[in-house]
Image: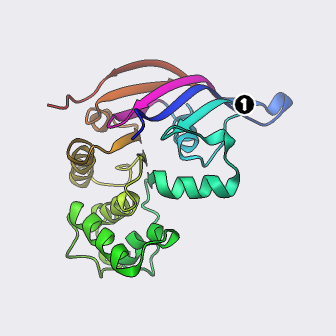
Amino acid sequence: MAEFAARLKQVEKVYGDGPQRVKVLDRVDIDLPAGDFVALMGPSGSGKTTLLNMIAGIDRPTAGRVEVAGEDLGKLGESALARFRSRHVGFIFQFYNLIPVLTAYENVELPLLLTKLGRAEREKHVRTALDIVGLSDRLKHYPRQLSGGQEQRVAIARAVVTDPTVLLADEPTGDLDARAADEILTLLQRLNREFNKTIAMVTHDPRAAERANRVLHLEKGVLVESGAGASRG
């Protein structure tokens, strides 16, 4: 494994031209060591989600360099980038993004359908992922039959089933009540501490940020300060 799961060097992102030109990220430098858990905080419009999308290879920088697992994403074409993303990036969304007509098992299996794994190997991976998130008894349930917290657990299982280099979580507790949110954050901490998963999490919630190993703050696209989150104790 590369020493750094991800590195951003002098990354800028600009949308529009002329008077409509908006700089969303301004010369951002971030090193995300393998096994780190970082929270990204800042007001709406500060560039947090854009930064996650850069690491995911969903968006490309206007200037600067983005590396994930030692690979310069700027050198990859669209098809190569899609393959790289399916192998190295797990994304967790605020609203789960589960497919309602698929069971929990089928939702988690989806990323594996892009791999060369046979059915038996896929089943092994899916069952392991659902067991890790505590839903081995819900694999035949559809999203509508699950609570919000359970839906997010399925989404997390889907994100980790390929054993990605980095997990990216965009407000993963934003649609949950306090109890479910606490359970999801505990699960993310467990993935980081027990399974050494590298996590970058966007959040508005200081209590959520406290679960991370460190906190980075964005203000109008600029990294303005950083602080400590939870100890690895």
Q: Quadrant of residue 141?
A: bottom left
- In the displayed structure, would residue 102 be above or below residue 72? below
Where is residue 137? Give x, y as percent.
Answer: 19, 76
Where is residue 34? Give x, y as percent.
Answer: 36, 36
Residue name at image x 44 percent, y 59 percent? 95
**Residue at the extreme left of the image, as rendered:** 233
> Where is the N terminus found, in terms of image quarters?
top left
Tag 1: amino acid: Val
> Where is the C terminus found, in terms of image quarters?
top left
- In the displayed structure, would residue 107 be above or below residue 61? below
**Mark 1, other Cα within 10 Å: few <14 / some 14–19 / many ≥20:** few
Instruction: Residue 117: tell me if it is visible.
Output: yes
Task: Pick whichever, 117 or 165, lies toward us.
Answer: 117
Q: Which residues are magenta?
A: 25-42
- In the displayed structure, would residue 102 be above or below residue 4? below
Where is residue 170? Give x, y as percent.
Answer: 45, 46
- Would you name the residue on which mark 1 appears? 22
Instruction: Residue 104: tell me if it is visible.
Output: no
**Residue at the extreme right of the image, as rendered:** 18
Task: Pick whichever, 122 or 146, lies toward us.
Answer: 122
Q: Secondary structure at mark 1?
A: strand
Magenta stretch: dominant secondary structure: strand
Residue name at image x 60 percent, y 49 percent? 58
Residue 104 left/right relative to 57: left
Residue name at image x 34 percent, y 80 percent? 120
Q: How many numbered badges does the structure rendering display?
A: 1
Where is residue 49? Give x, y as percent.
Answer: 53, 41
Residue 211 left/right relative to 164: left
Q: Quadrant of residue 139?
A: bottom left
Q: Quadrant of residue 158?
A: bottom left
* The stretch drawn in magenta includes residue 33: yes
